[in-house]
Amino acid sequence: MNFLAHIFLSDDDDLVRIGNFMADTIKGKSYLDFHPKIQRGVLLHREIDTFTDSHLIFRQSKHRLHADFGHYSGVLIDLYYDHFLAKNFDKWSDQPLKVFVQKFYLSLNTNFELLTPKIQNMMPYMISHNWLESYQTLAGIEKIMIQMDYRTQNQSKMRFGINNLKADYQLFEEEFYEFFELIQNHIDHFKSHLA
């Protein structure tokens, strides 16, 4: 799961969403230094990653890319799945994607001092290029893949991931739908037991 799915699967609380969003920049037990709601978001993020990485459907999607992209195949599936979530956002939310995304960007600006330095540096670029909404189109997701490939000095070949997505589009979308129902149920259960 990439940024959009992590944010969406959080509680309906700005700080929990922010914690989930920036969890990859918070290592080990250092999350305990943050606000309790941010801590909750970090724990949710870690549970989402654990469930996702070990789930048969996600691994099945990832395996289809492995020959072309190696260990970057999981990163691409995260992006593919965010694309399907963004494209079909109204299936899971009463709130339009544009409204959901703009509220999240506003919460990042409002709580800027609580963000990790890496997120503070990334946030203006993310908002100005509107990453979260751009996931809903193939052109938008391709642009993200090109940027990510560039950050690996074109070693990952992720810029070509759009071709694999187009080639097996319906299959990836079906896998996403099946997986997303399962992860929502799992995370709802996890949240009910999280202090």
Image (cartoon, rainbow, N blue to C red):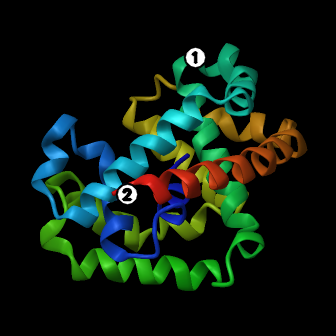
> Dot 2: what SS?
helix
Q: Residue placed at 46% from the left, 75% from the top?
A: 12
Residue that carries the numbered disc 2 in the rendered image: 21
Answer above or below: position of 133 versus 173: below
The quadrant holding residue 90 is bottom right
Q: Residues within 10 Å of mark 2 (few under 14, many from 20)?
A: many
Q: Is residue 157 visible?
A: no
Answer above or below: position of 146 versus 88: above
- The quadrant in which the C terminus is found is bottom left
Q: Position of residue 122 (x, y in %)?
A: 28, 58
Q: Position of residue 172 (x, y in %)?
A: 80, 41
Answer above or below: position of 13 versus 162: below
The quadrant holding residue 70 is top right
Q: Position of residue 51 (x, y in %)?
A: 56, 36
Mark positioned earlier in the residue sequence (1 or 2): 2
Q: Amino acid at mark 1?
A: Gly
Q: Amino acid at mark 2?
A: Phe
Q: Is residue 32 visible?
A: yes
Q: In the drawing, does residue 53 fall left or right of residue 147?
A: right
Tag shown at residue 70? 1
The quadrant holding residue 15 is bottom left
Q: 6 and 127: which one is in front?
A: 6
For marks 1 and 2, give the CA distance: 25 Å
